[in-house]
Image (cartoon, rainbow, N blue to C red):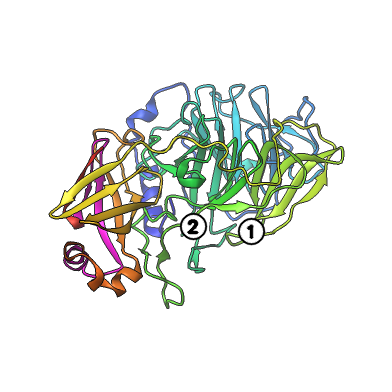
Amino acid sequence: MLRSSLAAAVLVAATFAPAAPAAATTGPCHPTGTAGLVDLVPGDSTLGLSALRLSAVSLPSQIHLRGTTATFNRRWSFALSAGRIHVKEASESGDWHVMSLPECLAGHVTGISVDDDELVALDEDGAVYTMDHALNAPWTWNWTRRFGSPLWLGGGTTVPSGATRWSWSVLSPGEDDVWRDTAGNNHPAGAAKVSHLFALSEDGSRITYLDPWLPADHSYEMATPLRGRFQARALSASASTSFVINRYGDMYTRLYDFDISGADRVFFRYSYEDQRGATIPKIQLPAPDWTHQPEIPGQVTDRISIHKTGAGSDARELRVEGSDQGRTGYWGKALTASRWTFTPTGDPLEGHGLENTPADRSTDTLAPPSPYDFTGTLGQVEAHIAEFDVAVAATPLTLQAGDQKLRVTLHTVDGLRQSPREPGLTSQPRSFYGTIEVPQAVLDHLDDLDPALRALVRDRLGSARFTDTDVAVTDRTLTIARLGLSLNRV
C-alpha cells in the first residue's frame, strides 16, 4: 500500500513499541527487520560483500530472467541453491558469495524474488520473509518475518496453497518516481512505496495479491484477462506491472495494485469522471486494464520476466525464454514497443516449451465463468446481474421495465479491510466501493425511457452519469444501497 508521511511515522513508532503482535511470537525464528520503514539512499558500495564466503556451487555468470530460483534488481543478482541464497553484482563480472541468513532460513529457502530494494524468500512451509535494503551494500541487509495489518506489523503470512507461480513487486518513489493512470495523468509513487506479492492460482485464472499493510489473508484478487477467465501458465511482476502468458504464447500486461485499483480511499482521491486536463487530477477510474502484447515470432517457453528500467510506469522490459534458429536465449522488448528482438545467451532452456502460434488463441482455454448470478425487483423494475466476480471491476447491470431494458455498469472495488476474511464470496458480507455508470446516450434521451426506468435514473441516481454507492455481496445476496435494491442469487 502506498504510504503517506503520516502513516510512515506511525509505522516507525509502532515498530519500536515494546509490545509485538502475539502471532509473531510463535515459531523458531522471527527477525523484526526494517522493511516498511524509510529507505536508505541507494548506493554503489559493496561494503560487507567480501565478508561473505565465496560460493562453492556452479552458478551462471549473469541472470537474465527474474524467477523464484534466480532473480535480479538493478544492483544485485541472486540465486538459490540447496536452500541457501547466493549473491553477486548484477554485471557479468564478479564472484558469487553465500548470503548470511537468519538461522531459521539458512538451508531452508525454497523460493526467492527481488524487486527494487526488497527481496522475499519462502521457507518449506511457504512462509514469507522480507529482506530490506536490497539496492544497498550487504552490511545494511536485514530480515523480517512481519507481514500484514496493522502497518506491516502483523505476525506473518504464507503464499496461497497451490500457487503455481509467484512474484514480488515494489513500486517506489526512489526508482519509479511516478505512475500513469488511464487519463494519462502521472501520480507520484507515494511518500514511501507499494509492495505486493502476486501469486497465480493452480488453474491460472486467479491472481491473489498480498500487501504487507493489509490483513494477512488471501482475500484480495486481481482478475486475469477476459474477465478472469484467461488461464495463464506463468506470471512475473515488477513495479505493480504484472505479466502473464498462456500455453499458446498469448501475453498480457497490466498496471495494477491495491492503491491503483481505487481501494485506498484513506490517502487518495479517485474519480470515474474524466480527469483529462484537470488542474489537480484525481486518480482516474477504472484502473488500467490488461494490455494484449504482440506475439513473439519464434519458439518460447513459460519462463517469463519483467523488470523496471527507469522512472515512470512505461519503463519496463519484458523477457521470454526461447530460441531462434537453433540459438538459445530470450526474446525481449520494452513494455510499449511493438516488436520483440532475440538475445542469444547459450544457456540451456529451463522452462516448458509452449505451442506459440501467430494467431491469438487467448480464448482457446478459458476457466468457467463465475457462477454468481443475481436477480431482484424494485417496484416495476427487474434487475439482473450475471457472472459477478469479486476480482472483476466492471459488471453489467440490466434494469428492465416491461419490454424495455436499460443496461448500466456496476463498478466495484474491493473495500479496505483490516481484519482477515475468507477469499471469494461466503455467508459473510463482502463490502465494495461501488459506482453506477449510466451511458451518456441514455441521459441525453431520458424521455425515451419507460416511466419506471426514467424515475429510477432521475430519483435514485440524480440523472448523473456516475453515482457512488455501497455494495455488499454474499454467496446468496447482492445489495446496492443507493438503489435500495437487494438481489438474490439465481
Left or right, 145 with reference to 106: left
Determine if residue 466 is in view.
Answer: yes
Residue 58 numbered mark, or none: none
Left or right, 326 with reference to 455: right
Q: In which quadrant of the rendered image does the C terminus lie? A: top left
Magenta span = 454-482
Which mark is first along the chain, 2 or 1?
2
Left or right, 99 with reference to 291: right
Residue that lies at the very extreme toward the right in this rendered image? 326
Residue tagged by mark 2? 288
Q: In x, y percent, where is residue 115?
A: 60, 45
Marks 1 and 2: which is nearer the front? 2
Q: Secondary structure at mark 2?
A: loop
Viewer-proximal residue, 73 or 208?
208
Viewer-proximal residue, 274 or 131?
274
Indicate whether 300 appears above or below 83. Answer: below
Q: Residue at position x 39%, y 43% from top? A: 15
Residue that lies at the very extreme toward the left in this rendered image? 379
Viewer-proximal residue, 431 or 366?
366
Is 367 part of what is drawn in magenta? no
Residue that lies at the very extreme toward the front in this rendered image? 403
Residue 315 numbered mark, or none: 1
Q: Residues within 10 Å of mark 2 (few under 14, many from 20)?
A: some
Count the labels in the image.
2
Q: In x, y percent, where is residue 374?
A: 27, 42
